[in-house]
Amino acid sequence: MIETLSPKKELEDLQADLREVQELLRRHRLVEHLVERQEMPKHELVESLVHRQNVAELRAKLDTMHPADIAYVLESLPLEERLVVWNLVKAERDGEILLQASDAVRETLIRSMDLQELVAAAEQLEADEIADLAPDLPEGVIHDVFQALPVEEREQLRSAMSYPEDAVGALMDFDVVSVREDTAIETVTRYLRRFDALPHHTDQIFVVDRDERLKGVLPLSKLIVSE
């Protein structure tokens, strides 16, 4: 379950947190640089006491921060440092932080995670929060999360994801027909004819990109008219 939002921090406080994280990252890079110059094997770096201390300090700092504040820090860092920080965040907080991050930063974080990590992150959230993330997640993640939920929560998630595009939730369901955005109408029509029966209440087809992300919908009525 997502934690209650803390009172909004003043920009000065957020920037102080950012500076502290940046200083810890600077130390982290310095240790790596020194070890590389000494041509120490990588496993020795991991075992380095100083390195472990720096990582522990950075992780401890992140543990004290609110998800929205961590999102602010992630948005302020270059990609390489962002991913270093992201990998030190406790796994059970991933979903909360993804919700708070900007679209562009959220995309880079999601790309760095494997399917299992994404499923685990989504499972920590409420149904409406999962629905908010759904358009940015690979299709398989939502299906796996749905299957793992108790029946009551499945229905809550199904309901949350049935809202129109301008409402809270995503334009997706679990028993849906989807096609790639570069598919011709004629090809879509031939594809649909292969079904013995379409999923219940199907009145539109979901259009996705190569990464299975939702790009729009194609009403069945448009297909009928095109024929």
Image: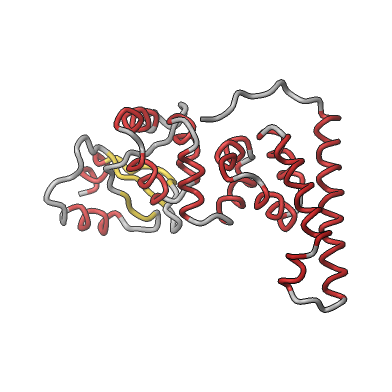
Q: Which residue is situated farthest in the bottom direction here?
A: 39
In the displayed structure image, the side of residue 108 where residue 205 appears, left or right: left
Task: Decide which of 105, 112 is in the foreground and name it.
Answer: 112
Q: Which residue is situated farthest in the left direction here?
A: 196
Residue 62 in the image: above or below residue 189: above
Residue 79 in the image: above or below residue 220: below
The structure residue drawn at horizontal position 45% and vertical position 29%, both measured from the top left corner, is 128
In the displayed structure image, the side of residue 46 where residue 106 appears, left or right: left
Task: State the image coordinates of residue 194 (x, y, percent, origin top left).
Answer: 16, 56
Looking at the picture, the colour scheme in use is secondary structure
The structure residue drawn at horizontal position 84% and vertical position 71%, both measured from the top left corner, is 35
The mark total stands at 0
Task: Decide which of 34, 82 is in the foreground and name it.
Answer: 34
Task: State the image coordinates of residue 169 (x, y, percent, origin top left).
Answer: 44, 31
State which quadrant residue 81 falls in. bottom right
The structure residue drawn at horizontal position 72% and vertical position 44%, both measured from the top left corner, is 75
Task: State the image coordinates of residue 136 (x, y, percent, origin top left).
Answer: 50, 45
In the displayed structure image, the side of residue 212 where residue 97 appears, left or right: right
Task: State the image coordinates of residue 119 (x, y, percent, origin top left).
Answer: 45, 47
The structure residue drawn at horizontal position 87% and vertical position 75%, both measured from the top left corner, is 37
Residue 54 in the image: above or below residue 96: below
